[in-house]
Image (tube, rainbow, N blue to C red):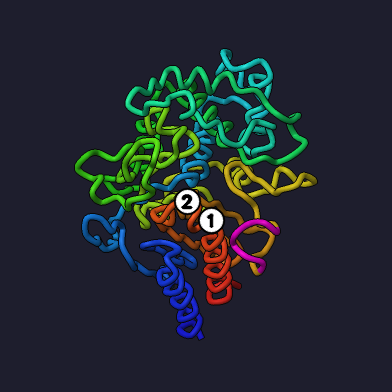
Amino acid sequence: MEFALSGNLDAVVDRGLRNEVFPGIACGIWKDGRLCYSRLSGFRDLEPEPLAMESDTLFDLASLTKPLSTAILFMRAKEKAGFALSDPLGRFLPEAAPGTRKLSLLDILTHSSGLPAIPALQRFFPDPAKIDPELAKRRLLEIEPELPAGTQVVYSCAGYLLLGLALERITGLSLPELFRRELALPLGLSAGAGFIPSPGLRGKAAATEYCAWRGRRMRGEVHDESSYCLGGAAGNAGLFATLGDVAKIASIFLNEGRGASGEALLSPESLKLMRTSLTEGLNRRRAVGWAMHDAETLDGPDWPPDSFGHTGFTGTSVFIEPRSRLLVVALTNRVYFGREATADSMPRFRRDFHSAAIKAFGA
């Protein structure tokens, strides 16, 4: 039975490749920590010649940066520094706009702060060769909420960009160094896992979109324009990792906050806040960092309510089903053909793939 249902997964992947939903894919399904299904198919780049997907291909994880880096690092900083999630952002960023500095950290972490979705910092830099990250920070700090906090979930990259600045202020470390110390080293991640891949590793990255603003295809550079304006390492996007790296980080949430070697990375309290809906009664179900299953999540209708996950704009995703101890990771470079070209087909692929996964390996 497992073999037949795995065949359904292969059919979904093959259809995605055939219909050019993405040039290539690296995906895996783990149950109880055991790899049950994996595929490395297609290409990480097509120009000037096709380059096949490999196990060490680095992916621009895009918004997977939020739950796999920013949210975890924030909870670890909270555990060490002893601040509360009810504290206002202004405790750490007093220079933020008046309405923004009053927002609680929890409202921002759950996307219920009322901050706008996309800050589009690139609009301040018509010439991408003349970006000033300090000016980009000042423009970010000028952003005000558009809705009262706690009234509606509005997915906000602006909020997580601000959380990234707050993390650096709290810890005194840059995001790349913080990720390296707090997650990459304890988890034994690959040399390429982290922000801003070194020039020697960029050739291992799955190429993403041709950026008209920057005048080139992105290869080992962050796709997200606002993150790029802040130097390529930000709270909303900028993390690069392999399929194996993503599985190691995500497994924390099935291992009671511990890494594979048993090291404690999240306290039980932090783990609960990251696996429980904190926005019940609002339009979407959000935990700290993760989206809890609802009618709009792209895991599909067969996943249970306590499931959670996240997607990334470049074509990446992680979904976790605690009862089955199921972890599903699908990494693609779907924006290679243009962000609009696969805007409709990628959600369909995600629902089909995750529906096949839960039928094959769920409870």
Residue placed furthest toward the left? 200
Residue at 38% x, 54% y: name it: 336
The reply to whether dot 2 and dot 1 touch (C-beta < 8 Å) is yes
Query: What number is the disc on residue 339?
Result: 2
What kind of residue is marked 2?
A: Arg
In the picture provided, is 198 more to the left or to the right than 185? Answer: left
Q: Position of residue 10 (x, y in %)?
A: 43, 76
- Quadrant where the image shows the C terminus: bottom right
What kind of residue is marked 1?
A: Ala
Tell how many labels: 2
Query: What number is the disc on residue 102?
Result: none
Mark 2: few/some/many CA within 10 Å (<14, 14-19, 20+): some
Q: Tell me the distance, in whole angstroms, between the alpha carbons under discs 2 and 1.
A: 6 Å
In this rendering, is residue 54 above or below 119?
A: below
In this picture, which residue range is highlighted in magenta? Answer: 295-301
Quadrant in the picture for residue 115: top right
In this rendering, is residue 324 above or below 57?
A: below
Quadrant in the picture for residue 322: bottom right
Q: Position of residue 287 (x, y in %)?
A: 64, 45
Q: Position of residue 326 (x, y in %)?
A: 53, 65
> Which element type, helix, strand or loop, lies under badge 2?
loop
Residue at 46% x, 22% y: name it: 136
Q: In the rendered image, which residue does mark 1 sit on?
A: 343
In the picture provided, is 337 more to the left or to the right than 284? Answer: left
